[in-house]
Image (tube, rainbow, N blue to C red):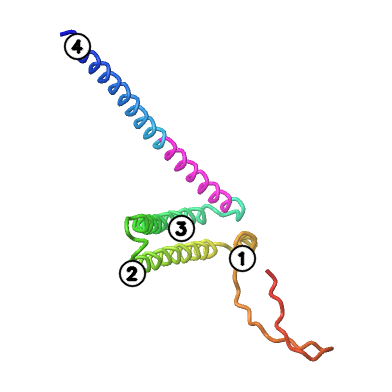
Amino acid sequence: MRDMSNNYLKSVRRLKLWVIILAIFNITIVSTIGVNMYLAKQREAQAKRSIEGVNTFFVKYLSLSGNQIEVFDSIVNDYSLSLKEVGMRLRSVKERFNSAGVENDTVVLNKIYEDFIMAQSLNRDLTMKFYENIRGICTQGQRKKFDDVISKTAITFEPQSIKEEVDEETQTTHQPEINR
């Protein structure tokens, strides 16, 4: 009888230990989810402030008028909505890329890479259209300021034809170095 009582007490102690372990585990999971939700909201708010900062910069730097600001806000809203589609496409690509067994299937990988390139191309095209639309609402003086700031912040690639140059002294031909 004493042996059975001893086993019962051991079982109860083990059960209590498992209850405590599971409670700690649940608290950890719930707190992690809560912290991640909080951090996601913080990142979203920071991104919104960043976008608003860029918008404010353009409005102040270009000295946009009231009508121009209304059109500018419309352009920004259209651009933001378009970028959400790009984000969904990129998220889809990421999910498909991270799915099991994809690394061995070249057909699927090629499709994923193709979709990724299409999403990045769409992002580039939307950005170019966005800047063209902003430039379109500017006056001549504002366009000059806009072009100046864009030329300082964007990397532009202009096709360069590489011509052979003749060295006058040695009469040999060589290709000129491209400044990078």
Residue receiving disc 2: 107
Query: What is the CA distance from the residue labelled 1 to the residue labelled 4?
Result: 97 Å
Q: Give yes or no for residue 49 being in the magenta stretch.
A: yes
| Circle 4 Cα neighbour tier, 10 Å, few/some/many (<14 / 14–19 / ≥20) | few
Magenta part of the chain: 38-59
**Left/right of residue 23 with respect to residue 124 in the rendered view:** left
Q: Nearer the viewer, mark 1 or mark 4?
A: 4
Where residue 33 sits in the image (x, y, percent)?
A: 36, 35
Q: Give yes or no for residue 72 being in the magenta stretch.
A: no
In primary-sequence order, the first of circles 4 and 2 is: 4
In primary-sequence order, the first of circles 1 and 2 is: 2
Q: Nearer the viewer, residue 3 or 128?
A: 3
Query: What is the CA distance from the residue labelled 4 to the residue labelled 2?
Result: 66 Å
Name the residue furthest top.
Answer: 2
Q: Are marks 4 and 2 in contact (CB under 8 Å)?
A: no
Residue at x 53% of width, y 51% of height: 55
- Quarter of the image with the N terminus is top left
Residue receiving disc 1: 140
- Quarter of the image with the C terminus is bottom right
In primary-sequence order, the first of circles 1 and 3 is: 3
- 96 lies above or below 175: above
Name the residue furthest left.
Answer: 1
Amino acid type, label 3: Ile
Q: Secondary structure at mark 2?
A: helix
Q: Nearer the viewer, residue 129 or 10?
A: 10
Residue receiving disc 4: 3
Where residue 42 sits in the image (x, y, percent)?
A: 46, 38
| Circle 1 Cα neighbour tier, 10 Å, few/some/many (<14 / 14–19 / ≥20) | few
Question: Any mark on residue 75, and which?
Answer: 3
In primary-sequence order, the first of circles 1 and 4 is: 4
Q: Nearer the viewer, mark 1 or mark 3?
A: 3
Q: Nearer the viewer, residue 167 or 25?
A: 25
